[in-house]
Amino acid sequence: MNTSITPKRKGAFICGATVGAVVFFLIYGFSVIVPVNVSWLHHSVDLEGLADLTQHELGWEMYRRSPWLFPAGLFWGLSPEPLSIVYTDSIPLFAVIFKILSPLLPRDFQYMGIFELLTYILMGGFGALIVDSGNDSADNTQKSWRYLYIICSSLIMVTSPVLTKRVFYHTALSAHFLILAAMLLLIYRKEAGRKKCRIGLLILVLLATLINAYYIPMVLGIYCMGILYDILSGEKKEALLDMASVMISGVSAIAAGFFLGMFEGSVSSSAENMERVSFNLNGLINPGNDILTHLKDMPLYDFSGAQSYSLFFNGLKVYSPWQSEGFSYLGLGMIILTVAALFCTIRNKKNTKLMVSIVITGLVFLFLAMGPVGTFGSRVLYTIPWPKSIYSLLSVFRTTGRFIWVVYYGIITLTLLYVCRSKNRILGALLIACTAIQLLDISPSLIYKHEVYGAAASKDEHVNELMESEAFSYLGQQCDEIIFVNPTAAIRMRPYWSVVFEEYALENDMVLNAAYCSRDTTASADRYSDENLEKRIQGEKFPEVLYVFINREIMEEQSKKFRLNVYEYGNIYIGTDLDLSGYDELREVPNE
């Protein structure tokens, strides 16, 4: 069997990849991919209201500044103990590569834009390969129709609302091409050969680990659908070999996690509130997206309002605004096309075993995405108290609503495959019409992203507010450490100030005891803070330390325990052994 990629397949990939690149530049412009253009990444709260993008960028910059440690993904600067680059969501694969190249790079260097461009290129290219899999002969589809199918399908993939939501919002989580790649392994396993697909699975799982571990169960789950189909089809030997491949890939993921330092330190591996960060059963037809924000004067999270990703429909009611994490609007064009394809499929029943495999896999991911509390709109459909062991295991991924992405892209893939493999020109014309409807329907989301990032990335240089302060300029020269007092409460309550002080620390070559990360990293920071303050109570002084009290309650509770000069700055409080009474931007707090 000829397992090499044919020129026709290469042409399909190039066509789809070109569509992806063009769409990316139309939405985000060229400034975002300029490596030395880092300013816009330092103030993401002013973009979409979240500190996460800034956290990703500053995590990379801290990692780059730190000396090499073992395992290689660990770095100093954001914790009393080494922290893994995994927990800053800074795309570990790129972070490690560019840290190696760091001596050759300019002082300011970012790769977030390059990663997102690559994401669009691969989404378009893989989308093209998916629909082109039905073109096994030159006579199957006229050349003009073939490329119309490829262009339409690639457009649908690269403008999918779930991708649009994540781009530059949760950068590493926008790597949806990993899901498409896993589906391609099943679609092309006869053409490429089982051996190559097993090697491909290993590579995909490693990539998932090195980009974002959320994709590990998604990739493995999709591949297991092929194993289920083999079992139902009596291909037991192939199923056993594939099971072995899955286990080897799982072990490789653990090894890659060790390389990144994922299991080091006292980072919390689990999270709470899975019941709320879930998929709502109306999600596939709900264009509503509740807007989560980290603002200067707000607590950890606030939902400042809602937006609709549809030009024609408003958002539907949901059980919790947190269910925006399971956002999965298909788009009007895809809904129409899916209904049409489903109608035709029901009339022409084929390959029952394959459909059973697909349905079982889809139901598993749907159940995982819905979590222990199933909801439809604002109503609770069921409550299933999961065993503690299962809850703890799944809570490692925290936001289980994202597992719906497998079902989401599965629906799109199956619909496009059916339409593009069909010789029915009516369905082909419907695909073209539905692509136009889709782009029109989701245009508000594309325009929104263009307005936020297309302009922001080319604006004037961002200046950290602490760096404009004479008092903090002086403190930056005198201090080499920042301690958030009671950091568990502080970092959870005020991510805005976390990234502001992190950028300030980078500029002044300082270290912090805690920072806002994707997991709770404050266990060691709490101990470190308490130990330092205990030494102060015993009479020791630390003029090289800048203490940060994130609100008045923490300041009043802690500052009574020791003598320290405390000053109010905006709506936070800082403590120091230095005298800052001469700086107008600070208001001294009497030590009662």
Image (cartoon, rainbow, N blue to C red):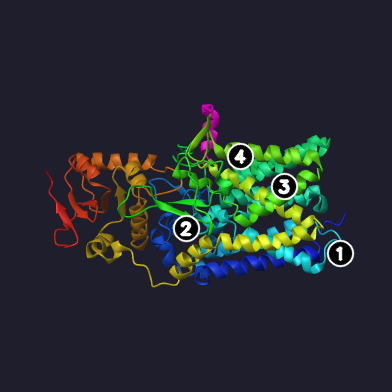
- Which residue is nearer to you in this view: 216 or 272? 272
Residue, disc 1: 138
* Residue 394 is inside the magenta segment: yes
Q: How much space separates mark 2 and mark 4, taking CA atoms?
A: 34 Å
Q: How many labels, in total?
A: 4
Q: Earlier in the sequence, mark 2 or mark 4?
A: 2
The quadrant of the picture occupied by the N terminus is: bottom right
* Secondary-structure class at tag 2: helix
Residue, disc 2: 60
Mark 2–mark 4 contact, CB under 8 Å? no
Residue 33 horizontal/vertical position (percent): 53, 68
Residue, disc 3: 342
Q: Earlier in the sequence, mark 4 or mark 1?
A: 1
Residue 78 horizontal/vertical position (percent): 39, 51
Instruction: Tell me if 530 is positioned left or right of 2 in this view.
Output: left
The residue under the point 44% across, 47% down is 82
Mark 4–mark 1 contact, CB under 8 Å? no
Quarter-of-image position of residue 161:
bottom right
Residue 189 horizontal/vertical position (percent): 79, 49
Q: Amino acid at mark 4?
A: Leu
Mark 3–mark 1 contact, CB under 8 Å? no
The residue under the point 68% across, 51% down is 338
Q: Is residue 113 above or below residue 73?
A: below
Q: How much space separates mark 3 and mark 2, taking CA atoms?
A: 45 Å
Res 211 seen here: yes
The residue under the point 68% across, 54% down is 337
Instruction: Tell me if 75 is positioned left or right of 531 in this view.
Output: right
Q: How much space separates mark 4 and mark 1, taking CA atoms?
A: 38 Å
